[in-house]
Image (cartoon, rainbow, N blue to C red):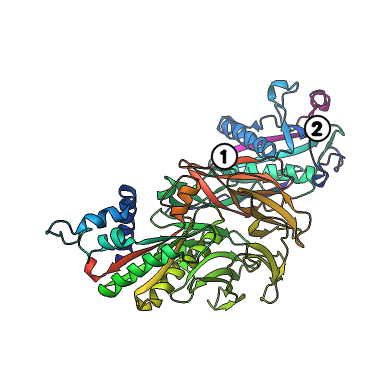
Amino acid sequence: MMRFLTSLLLGLTILAAPVYAQSGPLRLELDQGIIEPLPFAVPNFVPDGPAATQYANDLSRVVAADLTGTGLFREISSDAFISRVSSFEAPVQFADWKAINAEALVTGAVNVSGKRLTVRFRVWDVFSGQELGNGLQFSGTTDGWRRMAHKVADQVYSRVTGESGYFDSRIAFVSESGPKNQRLKRLAIMDYDGANVQYLTDSAAIVLAPRFSPSGDRLLYTSYETGQPRIYVLDVDRVKRTELKTQDGTMSFSPRFSPDGRSILYSLIQGGNTDLWKMDLASGQSVRLTNTPAIETAPSYSPDGSQIVFESDRSGTPQLYIMPSNGGEATRISFKQGRYGTPVWSPRGDLIAFTKQNKGRFHIGVMRTDGSEERLLTSSFLDEGPTWSPNGRVIMFTRESQGASGRATLYSVDISGRNLRPVRTPDGGSDPSWGPLQK
Amino acid sequence: MNVLSKVIALGVLSVLAACTNNDPSALGGGAGGNGSILPGSPSDPQSPAYFQQTVGDRVLFEVDQSTLTGQAQTILQGQADWLLANTDFVATIEGHADEQGTREYNLALGARRANAAREYLISRGVAGNRLTTVSFGKERPIEICSTEECYSKNRRSVTVLTGSTLG
């Protein structure tokens, strides 16, 4: 198997102090319901030689695509530009950018020497004529150019919104091909935008629902390679997997890491009954967390690790419950009409995303952790399995289309319910898990 | 691994059988008609093909249910009788769900269905150590349309024979 991470590790340098004092008034407040995307311009970064030309163009396009893809920004076409940026050091002609209503401007330069690529960039608040934050420089190997573009875009996003970005992150998912009754499934990993897909398993056995570790170094998933569903942990860089042994004669599935990455929650089926268990990864020891004749599954920790949200049909239909992380009394939090499943605690701790089935439709929704303020973000024949972007602003999920030619596709949606869009994958895709921002 | 590949092979076989012959009783009715019974064929009462097609290897469930209907109990009684008469065989009972539900819930629901069938067979005298279960949730539908007609066939448990005589 090939090496997984490109050997990019990014040197990061703060560029010399800018001409103007920082902290202009340009700021996108994400909680205030953004309807009108912020217009910005990314003139192609300036190459400092022929070897850098293609990289400079491609890198600028990825930065622009990252920002546009959020639905929060709108790129101004280069056709409208009055100024050309032919030197990274030359003073910005703010009047020319104001004239085309570019509120934010990103300028950059790319140097390629051998296999080493360096990108420098600055973010400008056009209307105040000031730089937003400091110029920065990233360098790494040329094959990691997309990651450098994502890092630039993350910087732009965080300087304009005041929140961390999510572009330099990866998605683990199940790649699907073939018809519904003979579907082939492979574990795969890719950049958040669908680039650089790598397969982690073949399609010999059904694989389900990969889940990233908090640091992104490992994946939990369920595989039928023994004939029974069982949980495996996979080292992402080495593509080496290990079965996590549970009791003989049982099926195990729906694993998820604890916030410290040292233990996992999972569902164990014994005698037809599904309960929640917790396994300490160092010792392999498991303890039971629920003990009811109902189905208990899809557990997810709160970010501080003190609580677990999960799905149970103890009331007669699947609903969401919260209990202490060592088990104990569970409190139901879902009370509206319908069936609720696959709850996932947001990285900020404030919301729980879930799948809801009601009147023949499926929805991805969010609610506060006490069940209040439920909002449905999507609606289709079959939406399920939400996962949070590292900054808690976007949710990715599986959408399966109807009928004999039905196909699974990854979609993402903003937690405001806007900007619903498919995520491109080579074949069908399901069960996304959004990894952390990369270091 | 060897056992597994047999299970898969049989699974495929039973799917094909279901596609080409939607009415198991049709085959059973004609089985004893002429004198020559081909060993291993659906007309050989000791063959897995007979179990699949004539006895019936699957039972169906109502939406979100794992309780056995009267019809399901009749089929399972036939399975129990066959297993008691053909003691070389062991069986894996697969539980399945239709696509209306989350992946996780359907896995758990499939396990309930497989277990309901297993418990019934045990109650009719089949030794528990001959019967294992596995749930496929909604991963392996046999019908792929998205209407109740298909869904009703996908909400099933399937008793898949394995055993030394298959080697």
Does residue A112 appear left or right of residue B143 in this picture?
right
Q: Which residue is mark 2?
A: A103
Task: Work out whether residue B161 can be spotted.
Answer: yes
The magenta stretch spans residue A110: yes
**On screen, A323 above or below B14?**
below
Q: Mark 2 falls on what kind of element?
A: loop
Pick out the residue farthest to the left.
B35
Q: Nearer the viewer, mark 1 or mark 2?
A: 2
Front-most of residues B164 and A192: B164
Tell me what residue is drawn at x 47 percent, y 76 percent.
A247
Q: Quadrant of residue A53?
A: top right
Does residue B147 appear left or right of residue A157 in this picture?
left
Crowding at mark 1 (Cα within 10 Å: few <14, some 14-19, many 20+): few
Which residues are the magenta region? A90-112
In the rendering, at what x and y percent does residue A230 appear?
47, 66
Label of residue A203 in the image: none
In the rendering, at what x and y percent does residue A151 appear?
66, 45
The amino acid pointed to by label 2 is Glu
In the rendering, at what x and y percent does residue B17 appear?
30, 52
Q: Mark 1 falls on what kind of element?
A: strand
Q: Which residue is mark 1?
A: A113
Q: Quadrant of the C terminus of chain A?
A: bottom right
Crowding at mark 2 (Cα within 10 Å: few <14, some 14-19, many 20+): many
Tell me what residue is drawn at x 40 percent, y 77 percent.
B123
Tell me what residue is drawn at x 74 percent, y 43 percent.
A157
Q: Residue under mark 2: which chain is it in?
A: A
The amino acid pointed to by label 1 is Ser
Q: Quadrant of residue A136?
A: top right
In the rendering, at what x and y percent does residue A427 appear?
48, 43
